[in-house]
Image (cartoon, helix red, strand yellow):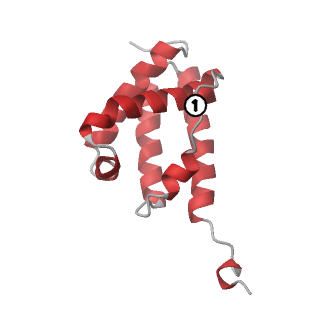
Amino acid sequence: MQHDSLTEETLRTFLAAFYAKVQRDPLIGPVFARVIPDGDWPRHLTVIQDFWSSVLLKSGRYKGNPFGKHQRLSELTPAHFARWLALFEHTATEVFSTDVAVLLTERANRIGDSLKAGLFFRPEGLEHDC
């Protein structure tokens, strides 16, 4: 059943389905497995729920630093972000109606682009500071 509205409950349903796929994915699953032990997934999902609730529903619950968390993962590449976004979009279209899925994926792409810019963009000349 596709949901027509974005609420805390439908967001929770979406995130559970999405991160189940993430954990099984051959490219990004191992990255997550290295930093989130199996027993920590419930806590991680709560943090992720708070993040997306703050971004999409303006709840203000998330107080973390997503850039700092990702910056510590030296193995990340743009391919990891592309796979994460593909799974995100696929799951969004399974769980939500088109309008809601588009809202989620547009926001995820903007956040992903921002993270990628901070993690991977290196303007020429900056690596050779005076």
| Vertical order, 87 against 43 (above or below) | below
Which residue is nearer to you in this view: 80 or 102?
Answer: 80
Horizontally, is 24 left or right of 11 in the view? left
Name the quadrant of the N terminus: top left
Name the quadrant containing residue 129: bottom right
Q: Which residue is at 68% across, 73% downward?
A: 123
Q: How crowded is mark 1: few (under 14 residues within 10 Å), some or many (20 or more)?
A: some
Q: Please, what is the three-letter code of the amino acid marked with disc 1?
A: Tyr
Name the quadrant of the C terminus: bottom right
Q: Which residue is at 38% across, 31% downward?
A: 43
How many numbered marks are there?
A: 1
| Vertical order, 27 against 57 (above or below) | below
Q: Residue furthest right?
A: 130
User: Can residue 107 be seen in this snapshot?
Assistant: yes
Horizontally, is 35 left or right of 86 in the view? left
Which residue is nearer to you in this view: 115 or 93?
Answer: 115
User: Can residue 95 be seen in this snapshot?
Assistant: no
Residue 126: percent from left, percent from top: 69, 78
Q: Which type of secondary structure does the marked residue at label 1 adopt?
A: loop
- Label 1, on which residue? 62
Name the quadrant containing residue 84: top left
Horizontally, is 19 left or right of 118 in the view? left
Residue 8: percent from left, percent from top: 51, 16
Q: Which residue is at 61% across, 27% downward?
A: 54
Q: Which residue is at 40% across, 30% downward?
A: 45
Residue 26: percent from left, percent from top: 27, 50
